Amino acid sequence: MISNEVKQQLIRIVGEENYDDSKAGRLVYSYDATPQFQSLPDAVIAPRNTLEVSRVVKICNEHRIPIVPRGSGTNLCAGTCPVEGGIVLVFKHMNKILEIDEENLTVTVQPGVITLDLMNAVEAKGLFYPPDPSSMKISTIGGNINENSGGLRGLKYGVTRDYVMGLEVVLANGEIIRTGGKLAKDVAGYDLTRLFVGSEGTLGVITEATLKLIPMPETKKTMLALYEDLEAAARSVSKIIANKIIPATLEFLDQPTLEVVEAYAQIGLPTDVQAVLLIEQDGPKEVVERDMKKMAEICKKEQAVSVQLARSEEEAEALRTARRTALSALARLKPTTILEDATVPRSEIAKMVKAINKIAEKYNVKICTFGHAGDGNLHPTCPTDARDRDEMERVEKAFEEIFAKAIELGGTITGEHGVGAMKAPYLEWKLGEAGIAAMKAIKQALDPNNIMNPGKVFAKSTRKRVVVTR
């Protein structure tokens, strides 16, 4: 709990209007997009600038008060659920695009900037920010950096980490540091920028970011390939890459997902095939046309029953939107929707999808699978009901086997969602004891009082989702 004396100190920093410890205000920030995790913070604070963040953090460090930096709460690993109470920091005031530097091809932003707003702002100047999480309409840049968010364009363009050039960070002791910058080359010391990207708020509070931009692609084309056989779809993915073609988007949806998405989007998606590949290429017109022709040939050779080019940008956008709304569509089926991610080498996608289906059958649960086939990142998704304890037990066991299978196939427990609280019990499977020890040493060095988003990343004794109330 926060004493009245500390509360008054914090109010003097941010103003009474930016400090909320009402039951309703705390409840709003007690959960994120991860089902079955909830815990009330002691207060919610909205700082107005970096100096206020620094002063708040110093007080919290002195009094051992946990701090949870939070964007829009769209993460799916319980990364922003305040499982140990304390303060949730929200950045509704720190939401400005500070500079678009066309000479250095960078944009500098505060953490509360909405991802799509950033994209639109730079595209108005003929520039391009590629990372495109499905939640981009509401997710913030600060959240994207903390989770190292991916997206549909990750195969060709990489993920958030690949576009973060510099950061301003408030450390756990309240000190402010700057890492990186607008430099194309910088090897002065440890790469602290990359250390903070994907650290899920456990090492410091990001208050500003300088991001890399690239020129806007000249043109784009979209194609849909339909398959009666999962392995044929997976072979197509491998053959496309083996032919030295890196498409901008190479997405996979299985038949159960197609049915649900079409019922939701109603754009004419086929629902009588086993799998669909959504393929896009962008760049110079002649390159795009050459690549699309070659990829169509590969898909047909690998037994695609149909290959269709989008006839207009409107049709292409409808296909992209349908893919991005897969989670929303699946969420209509049951009261609780658990969307996970596991990544395997792209050559193992067919084995992974088959394993997911067998595991679902074994535990008598429905699992729909879609994801980024080009980089091997799949999203097995289970519509369920948290009130059905027996089914939830089976769902947990099913996902535990799915994570184990991904590692067995040379993959990982998460490709883009992060570890947070949800996957902390499984992290050691991937990193081993020595890997966990190395991470803990870094955490201890930067945050000795363990105030920065405690209860996340590192393994817990339980391997079940829990509802925590305070």
Image (cartoon, helix red, strand yellow):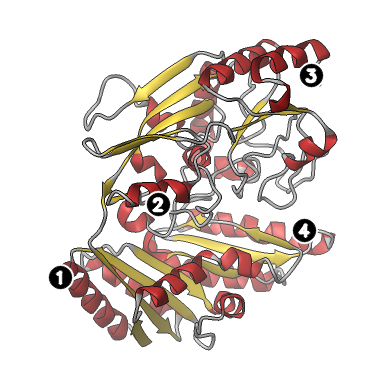
Give x and y (percent) for residue 283. Answer: 22, 62
Q: Earlier in the sequence, mark 1 or mark 2?
A: 2
| Local secondary structure at mark 3 | loop
- What is the three-letter code of the residue carrying label 3? Ile
Relative side of 263 to 115, left or right? right
Q: CA distance from mark 1 to mark 4?
A: 53 Å
Q: Kindly give the residue lying farthest to the left in the view shown.
A: 286
Asked whether the viewer can see residue 241, the reply is no
Q: CA distance from mark 2 to mark 3?
A: 41 Å
Q: Residue at x 22, y 33 (%)?
A: 184
Q: Earlier in the sequence, mark 2 or mark 4?
A: 2
- Indicate the quadrant where residue 349 lies: bottom left
Give x and y (percent) for residue 320. Answer: 44, 68
Q: Earlier in the sequence, mark 3 or mark 1?
A: 3
- Residues 24 and 222: in front is 24
**Tag 2 residue:** 120
**Tag 3 residue:** 2
Q: Earlier in the sequence, mark 2 or mark 3?
A: 3
